[in-house]
Amino acid sequence: MAFFQPQAFDVSLPLPVVHGTVEKPKPAVSTIRFDTSAMGSFIAGGAAGGVSRVVSHPLDTVRVKLNVGLHKTTTDCVVQTAKADGVRGFFRGLSPPLTCSVLECAVLFQAQTTATKWIADRRNGGLATALDHTLGGAAAGFLASQILTPGDLIKSRLQVSKGDLSPAQCVRNTLADKGLRGLFRGHIATMAVEVPGLGLWFGTFDFSKTMICSNRDAATPSEIFGCSTVSALVYHSAFYPFNVAKAVVQTTPDSQRPKGIFQLLREDVRNGGLRSLYRGFGVHMVRVIPGTAVMFSVHHFLSNMFSSNETSAG
């Protein structure tokens, strides 16, 4: 067997000898990489939020108009909106929530992924449970609310406006009237919905995957649809009244504005019973079920794609 001197290769580390030959040293490769679990979730969340918003916005326009009492029935709302503005009327106010949805969902999914991992590492040695996903979702909901409130306010005002009010003009009017604080009208209602609601949303979705999916890590589109439908039903059934109150608070002039969302909810129950708290709930669910399915499906597909790329790179 021949012996080779490592110095001949001008390296400082000993070289492995295999079958009498020496492997040449490979050039150094940097081990610094992005955390694709977080970065991938951020990108996937943003894409999921954008696609979901475009798909669901027309029915959201109908829901908001029903919430604030512009129309008595869904049919009347659809007919009158189409007659007044055509198809464009159903997409009025899309740009603010589309921008916010991309940013909000990117932050939401990335924050939920990071928070859930942090909680699971400390509670269960890294094995995330439905409770961990719930707590992570609540933490993410707090962050997402800071983005959602201004975008939702501008969207709601544009949807109920008459005329060609632009998003930029609506923002300027709001800032001129109430300053930066004006963009956060209804923020308490948003927080009341998003913090516990998104915790319930993520927790229910994860629990549903355990019950419905044959393989949690390789769920089929139909399984994702089933899980997202369950999570949407639970979340929106529990927190829809706060969404109604928020839409009213954000679009009512100051002179007619109620003192708070709880006063508004009490007045609604006193005047119309519990049923009044679920005005527009049917059309809302027709919107959110496919919208939630699209959101989770896009996020699931892109997250898996990023994970596959990370595995290949590793």
Image (spheres, helix red, strand yellow):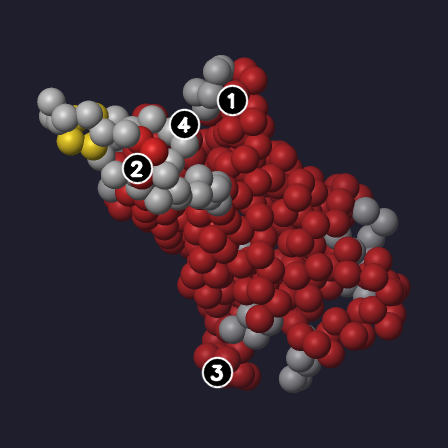
Q: Which one is in front in this view, the residue at disc 2 or the one at disc 1?
A: 2
Which residue type does callout 1 highlight?
A: Ala
Which is more toward the observer, 28 or 312? 28
Residue 86 marker: 3
Residue 227 marker: none
Judging from the image, what secondary structure is the residue with disc 2 in?
helix
Whether residue 193 is situated above or below residue 91 in the rendered picture: above
Q: Looking at the image, how many numbered discs can be counted on the residues? A: 4
Q: CA distance from mark 2 to mark 4?
A: 61 Å
Which is more toward the observer, 198 or 92? 198
Judging from the image, what secondary structure is the residue with disc 3 in?
loop
Instruction: Please indicate whether residue 210 sits to the left or right of residue 62 in the image.
Output: left
At x 51% / y 22%, what residue is drawn?
120
N-term mark: 4 or 1 = 1
Residue 207 marker: 4
Q: Which one is in front in this view, the residue at disc 4 or the one at disc 3?
A: 4
Which residue type does callout 4 highlight?
A: Phe
Position in image of residue 252 (x %, y %): 77, 63
Judging from the image, what secondary structure is the residue with disc 4 in?
helix
Instruction: Please indicate whether residue 137 sits to the left or right of residue 220 in the image.
Output: right
Would you call the spot at circle 3 few (<14 residues within 10 Å), some (14-19), or many (20 or more)? few
Residue under numbered circle 2: 8
Instruction: Please indicate whether residue 217 sits to the left or right of residue 32 in the image.
Output: left
Residue 120 marker: 1
N-term mark: 2 or 3 = 2
Would you call the spot at circle 4 few (<14 residues within 10 Å), some (14-19), or many (20 or more)? some
Position in image of residue 183 (x %, y %): 77, 61
At x 27% / y 46%, what residue is drawn?
221
The quadrant of the image that shows the C terminus is: top left
Q: Are marks 2 and 1 in contact (CB under 8 Å)?
A: no
